[in-house]
Every structure is written in structure tokens, then in C-alpha cells.
Amino acid sequence: MEIELSSGALADLHATIGARRGVVLAPDLAGRRRLFDDLASSLAVTQNWNVIVVDAIGSDDLQQATIEDRDQAVSGLDDDEVVADLVDAANRLEVDPVALIGFSLGGMYAYKAAASLRFDRIVSFYGMIRLPSHWRGPNQREPLDLLTHVEDRSSILAVVGTDDQFTPVADVDELISLGVKVARYPGARHDFVHDPDLPVHRPRDSADAWSQVFEHLARSDVVRT
């Protein structure tokens, strides 16, 4: 079901009866689409979660834009506005606790949204640990700087490949030094988990990564009463 957030951004809500937790999904640069709608629906049914999909690039004008146009738009995003949408989406799920799972661009915003303290668990699939130079803008802050405001950084799980230009070894080591949990997959490239149609997809590593995600979130799952 498509709903409208307070900002006017649209989101896809998948609710289940007696959900034991809520999950906000933040997609990659390509945004809301069938891939994430299917993922949200599957997680709602198989995990008994309420799930909502929220695009960091919430502008209606950019929903159907090219990847190149959306990429250029990131530097103009306002962190506070993006995080406000993610928090608003969490509040629409009508269940606690709520986790945030992000992929690539969404994974970067998962790190940033951790500082909101609204989410009990954070999972970042190959989110940018430092801003790529062409994404820097006046209202963009460094993910690593925002993570220092999170007291329990063990509540954050980073899923990364060792052959990913967006998650270089030095940056991943810095995450580890902050206390972030890291699941590292040798030889895996960017986007190796969430889209089975991509040539970089690794089914075995993807299955293992999701098992780690389920374990990470299960530590604070509750039964709604």
C-alpha cells in the first residue's frame, strides 16, 4: 500500500497481523521499485514484520529520473530532511521496536539515521562510510561523524564486500574501531546481496548475510500485545 509521509514523499507500506517488529527499508540509488516492493512483502510475510520502503531521494520529479540524474541530486539532499522521512516512516508502522535496513545510498543514510536514536537496530548493506566527493553538499554530513553520536554502536551491522570501492578497507577498519559490527565477504563487490539480476550478485554470500541480519534483529524482537 502506497502512503504519503508528512513531507509529501511517498512510501510503500507492507503490514502483517501481530507484527513482532517494524522495519524501514532504504533503497539504493535507483530508489523505490518492484525489487524493493517484493523484498518488503517477503520480509513482512516470512519474518512477521511491518515493513515500509522509503526513498532517500523523495522528490516526485526524480522518482522516474535516470540514475545519472539521481546521482547528481544526492549532493543537494538535506540530511535532516531525509532522516526525518525515515523516522516518520518508522512511526507509521505502529509497532516497536523498529529497525532500519539500507542498501548502498540507503545504507549510507542508515548510518546517518542511527544518530536519530529512533531505531533499535541498524543494518547497512555496503553503505558509503565516507561521502563520495561528488555527493558532498552544504547539507550533507559525514556518516562517520554522525556515528560518534551513537552510544551503542554494536546495534549497527555493516555488510560489506572486500572488493567494493565504496567501502575501502581503511574505512571499514574505522567502523570496527568505533564498535560497529562488520560482516565482511572476501571478493564481493558493491550490490552483491540485494539484486539477483546483477552480475555481481553472490547467492551464497547473500543468504549468509541475511541470516546475520535476522540474528542481529532478533536480539530485540518483541511480540506485540
Image (spheres, rainbow, N blue to C red):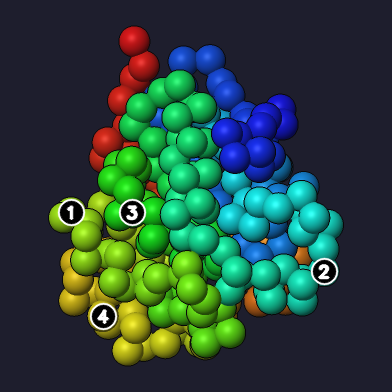
Which residue was labeled with disc 1? 152
- Single out the mark in the foreground, 2 or 4: 2
User: Which tag, 2 or 4, sits closer to the chain's start?
Assistant: 2
Q: Secondary structure at mark 1?
A: loop
The amino acid pointed to by label 3 is: Ala
Examine the rendered structure and indicate whether residue 141 appears above or below residue 2.
below
Tally the numbered discs. Answer: 4
Which residue was labeled with disc 4? 174
Corner quadrant of residue 178: bottom left
Alpha-carbon span between mark 3 and mark 2: 29 Å
Which label number is shown at residue 114? 3
Q: Secondary structure at mark 4?
A: helix
Question: Which quarter shows the N terminus?
Answer: top right
Corner quadrant of residue 134: bottom right
Which residue was labeled with disc 2? 66
Residue 139 visible to an observer of this rendering:
yes
Q: Secondary structure at mark 2?
A: loop
Which label number is shown at residue 69? none
The amino acid pointed to by label 2 is: Thr
Q: Secondary structure at mark 3?
A: helix
In percent of the image, x 67 and y 30: which residue is there?
Answer: 3
The amino acid pointed to by label 1 is: Asp
In percent of the image, x 34 and y 32: which residue is there?
Answer: 97
The amino acid pointed to by label 4 is: Glu
User: Which tag, 1 or 4, sits closer to the chain's start?
Assistant: 1
x, y percent for residue 156: 31, 57
Q: Residue furthest top?
A: 225
